[in-house]
Every structure is written in C-alpha cells, then in structure tokens.
Image (cartoon, grey):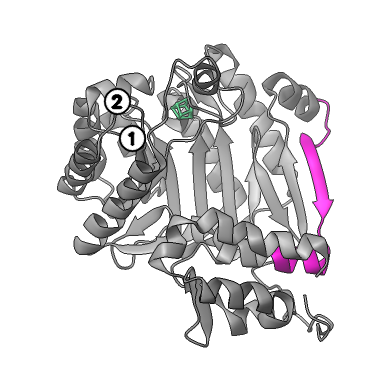
C-alpha cells in the first residue's frame, strides 16, 4: 500500500455489500461420502434429517421477520437426498422467511440418482428456477475413482427429468482426476455440452487434508496428474466452452450469455449474504461468520437457543478492501476501479498499485483502464495472483 491511501469514502444507504439479499441454506446429508469431499457433509445419519430441519427452521427464524431475497441457493451435501416430505418442508421454510424479488434466482443442488419426477415438480412448484447437478464426469471408471454414487446414465436421466420443468441447468465437472487423460476430459466437456446446460462449473481435483483421497496420496496409493496436464485440461475447458458460446465469467465457471450464477456472483463481488445450516458462512453488515461443521454441536447449539457459530469476525475497512480485491479478481470482468472505490472506500491503485504493475508486466493481468483482469496466462495462476492482493494488505503495505 502506498502512502497516499485516503480515508474510506461514505457508502450509500443499504449497499449490497452490507445488506444481504442473497441466501444460502445448507443441507449436509449425502447417501455416501465421496473420497475427495471436504464439504460439511454427513453420510449414514439420515435419521437426523427431521431434527436438522427443526434446527434449521429455528436458526433461520433468528432473522426475526421475513426478508427480501434476490438469490437463494440450497446446497450441500445433497439437498435432494431429503425425502419428498422433508424437501417440501425445507422449501416451505425458505419461502416463509424470504420474500422473492420478481427477478429472483433460486438454485437447488442435486445429485444424479436422487431425483424423481415428483421431487422435480415439487421444486418447480415452489419456484425453484435453477438446478445445479453434480455430474463430475461421464466416464464410469473416473466416477468410481471419485466414489460418486451415480453413473453416466443417471446424469442423462437427471437432466431429462429436470428439464421437463426447469430450463436453467448447471453441471459440475471435475478434471485432473488420476487416470484421466486430456482426450477423456475433452470428451467429458463435449458430453456435457451435448446435454445443453446453461452453465458449467469445472474444478480441478484437490487433495484436501483429512479426506480419504488425501490419505491415499500420503500413502503413495494415488498419483496426482502432472501439473502440465492439469493446465492443459483447464485450457481445453476454456477453449472448448468459449468456442461453444459460453462466457468464462469466473475462474471455474462458464455460462451461456445471461446465465451466470447470480448467487455466486454475490460471493465474488464480496457482497453480503445470509448463510444457514451446518458449516454455512454468512457475511452480514460487515460481519463474517461461519457455522460449526460438527452436526451434533450444530443441533445442540441451535436447540439450546445459541447461535451455531464456529467463528465470527468484523473485518477492518482495509481487510474488507483486500478481500474484495482477492475475490473480484477471479471474475471475468475483474476489478472495476470505480465500483471497487465505491464499495471499499479505497482507491485500488493506492492499495495495490505495485501488485497490479508487477502482474501486468509479467503478463498475468491486463489493465485496459476502467478495470483490471486476469489474462489467459493469469487464469492459469489465478490463486497465486489473488493471494498476492491479500498478502500485501496483511503486510500492511
Ligand atoms: S455428493 Fe458432494 S457433498 Fe456429498 S459427499 Fe459427494 S462430494 Fe461431498
């Protein structure tokens, strides 16, 4: 940070970075825990689903009165692993506490093999207008490696079922799976495109500490794909999907024009959002909080009338600015100088001028003037560039 950092400017009343109109609700139950999964999930505890919904309702009721929502996202876990009745109850709770704006987006995550026509009808009848399906791969051996609970056929069946009522479908895909070749990955991309989704998320497989996959890595039982191959796979996704008319609007996300996930754009803008349920994060009025990931603790805390928080912190203005830069640089539009200044109260170049210059020189960032954004080369090293923004502000430059 250079010496001419100005004092924060005055923010407008009810700005979207302080007052949330985005809602995340977490449903942790899964039929089976996949080997790479590091989410707040539980398998084999289906008997706790009703009790969990009771607690979730109680936690949400803590907001006091119904609130307006532009985007809702019910994620997991596997929300569609709830029974029909339980899913209906969940949707009722959400509708009771959140008043949908006319142009709302309401996403529910689902896994292939967990949907039937009745559940799809239920979702659509309640107003869900976007379904995100965890496809991950169209190759049976790779799905088996990931310990997914479905095969390629179930992905096709799920898309067909959902599309009868809900047009806006997103598919998640994973690359850099041990044993996966570039040609296999390209086929996955083409198989996904053939299903006509509006949105695709592509993630490189990560080895999160503590997962069975990570343990197998430590024991030498799994060999990750070479870094160059992983980069080639990411580039293949960029080329294949943009050629197919998709916009690369965030590092891992591609959408047909007009179909970017508005809920996730809230996170990447560093705007405010509610979060409810096991392990859920929230960012309300400048306070960032995360719920416990321990299901028993979550139930105990909510049932005894306490907030189920694991952590809660109010960020300083400078910390907020650093986080905002780190998140916004992930977007296709990058960081827009004017809106960054309005949102954070700081001039981007006063805070991060040196970082921007260095990365422009090394070809990782481009700076057309009103905004800065990642180049193609920068997208391959996005985490490194993003971390640099945070690094600088932590050092207090
Ligand atoms: S289905 Fe998704 S949330 Fe559930 S265990 Fe597998 S990766 Fe985790």
Mark 2 vs mark 1, CA separation in Å: 9 Å
Discs 2/1, front: 2
SS of the residue at dot 1? strand
Residue nearer the viewer, 145 or 183? 183
Q: Within the magenta stretch, is there residue 335?
A: no
Question: Where residue 231 sits: x, y (%)?
Answer: 37, 49
Residue 121 pos. (x, y %): 31, 38
- Whether tag 2 and tag 1 are in contact, CB under 8 A, the answer is yes
| Residue nearest the viewer, comparing 346 with 293 | 346
- Residue shown at the point (31%, 24%) measured from the top left: 143
What is the quadrant of the C terminus in the image?
bottom right
- Check the picture and name the quadrant holding the N terminus: bottom right
Which residue lies under the disc numbered 2? 142
Q: Specify whether tag 2 is near ligand 1 (CB below 8 Å).
A: no
Q: Is residue 181 left or right of residue 175?
A: left
Which mark is on residue 314? none
Residue at which label 1 appears: 136
Residue 366 visible somewhere in the drawing = yes
Q: Quadrant of residue 40?
A: top right
Of residues 73 and 391, the one drawn nearer to the viewer in this rendering: 391
Please give the range of residues in magenta.
304-322
Establish if 331 lies above or below 198.
below
* Residue beneath the point at 71% across and 19% down: 296
Question: Magenta span has 318?
Answer: yes
Q: Earlier in the sequence, mark 2 or mark 1?
A: 1
**In which quadrant of the rendered view does residue 185 lie?**
top left
Q: Is residue 18 visible?
A: no
């Amino acid at each position: 940070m250079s010496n001419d950092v100005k004092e924060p400017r005055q923010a407008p009343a009810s700005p979207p970075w302080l007052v949330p109109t985005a809602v995340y609700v977490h449903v942790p139950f899964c039929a089976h825990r996949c080997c790479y999964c590091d989410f707040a999930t539980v398998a084999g505890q289906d008997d706790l689903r009703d009790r969990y919904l009771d607690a979730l309702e109680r936690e949400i009721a803590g907001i006091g009165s119904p609130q307006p929502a532009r985007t809702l996202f019910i994620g997991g876990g596997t929300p569609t692993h709830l029974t029909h009745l339980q899913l209906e109850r969940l949707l009722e709770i959400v509708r009771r506490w959140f008043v949908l704006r006319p142009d709302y987006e309401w996403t529910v995550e689902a896994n292939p093999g967990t949907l039937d026509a009745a559940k799809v009808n239920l979702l659509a009848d309640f107003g869900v207008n976007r379904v995100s399906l965890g496809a991950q791969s169209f190759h049976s051996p790779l799905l088996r490696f990931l310990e997914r609970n479905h095969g390629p056929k179930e992905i096709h069946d799920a898309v067909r079922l959902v599309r009868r009522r809900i047009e806006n479908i997103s598919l998640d895909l994973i690359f850099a799976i041990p044993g996966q070749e570039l040609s296999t990955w390209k086929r996955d991309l083409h198989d996904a495109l053939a299903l006509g989704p509006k949105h695709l998320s592509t993630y490189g497989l990560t080895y999160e500490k503590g997962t069975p996959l990570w343990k197998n890595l430590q024991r030498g039982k799994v060999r990750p794909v070479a870094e160059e191959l992983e980069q080639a796979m990411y580039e293949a996704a960029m080329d294949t999907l943009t050629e197919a008319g998709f916009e690369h609007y965030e590092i891992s996300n591609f959408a047909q024009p007009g179909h970017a996930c508005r809920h996730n754009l809230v996170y990447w803008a560093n705007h405010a959002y509610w979060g409810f349920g096991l392990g859920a994060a929230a960012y309300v009025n400048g306070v960032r909080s995360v719920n416990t990931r321990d299901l028993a603790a979550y139930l105990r805390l909510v049932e005894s009338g306490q907030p189920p928080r694991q952590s809660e912190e109010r960020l300083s203005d400078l910390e907020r600015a650093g986080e905002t830069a780190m998140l916004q640089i992930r977007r296709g539009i990058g960081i827009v100088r004017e809106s960054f200044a309005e949102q954070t109260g700081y001039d981007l170049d006063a805070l991060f001028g040196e970082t921007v210059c260095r990365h422009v020189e090394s070809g990782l960032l481009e700076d057309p003037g009103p905004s800065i954004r990642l180049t193609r080369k920068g997208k391959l090293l996005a985490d490194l560039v993003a971390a640099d923004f945070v690094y600088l502000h932590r050092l207090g430059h």
